[in-house]
Image (spheres, grey):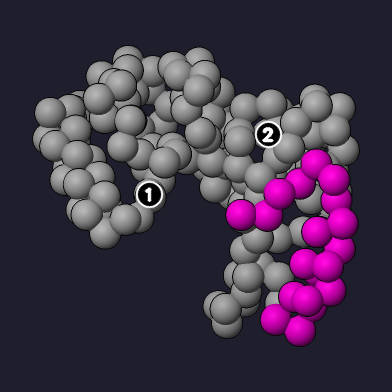
Amino acid sequence: MALLRINTNKVISNINKISDFMAQNNKEWSLITKVFSGDLSLLERILIPEVIKNIHSVGDSRLSSIKILKKLNPDMITIYIKPPALVYIDEVVKFADISSNTSYKTICELDKAAKKQNKIHKIIIMIELGELREGVKRDELLKFYENVFSLENIEVI
């Protein structure tokens, strides 16, 4: 059977090197934990206070992992890095401080959920750059932003 060994000291060292580099250049950054698959024991060993104090936020593409990150440290800023499915909107607002979005309909639902939870939910709007994968198309961008900026419980970052 295959065995994966993760040297947490080297992972922490790499995170600290990136943090130092970003700080020297007056930049904030987000650590994406997707590769750790929400493994609480591993995240507890890596996301120690000395490590996360220099990171703006921590993101993942799995809502279950976002929940674990919030359980680990409720004050940590979390980013859901894929467009949320409508069925999970309430949980996205509850556990993710920021989410990546492409759909005005989804953002409207996030706004409603944030209002119910008495929160402001921050979003990153993904823009289509030519790969034709996902994102707001250029010719729709101004109208899209105009509509999004009218929502009371959404903040575009």
Residue at (80, 41) in percent of width and height: 153
- Disc tally is 2
Q: Note whether 109 is above or below 141 in the view shown.
A: above
Residue at x-position 53% and y-position 30%: 66
**Residue that label 1 marks:** 29
Q: Alpha-carbon distance for marks 2 and 1?
A: 21 Å
- Residue 140 point in image, percent of width and height: 79, 78
**Magenta span dominant secondary structure:** helix
**Magenta residues (range):** 138-157
Discs 2, 1 touching: Cβ within 8 Å: no
List x then y, in percent, for residue 51. 26, 30
Instruction: Note whether 38 is above or below 71 in the view shown.
Output: below
Residue highlighted by disc 2? 92
Mark 2 or mark 1: which comes first in sequence?
Answer: 1
Q: Which of marks 2 and 1 is in front?
A: 1
User: Which of 8 and 112 lies nearest the eye of the viewer?
Assistant: 112
Mark 1 closeness class: few <14, some 14–19, many ≥20 residues within 10 Å: some
Percent across and percent down for residue 150 are 87, 57
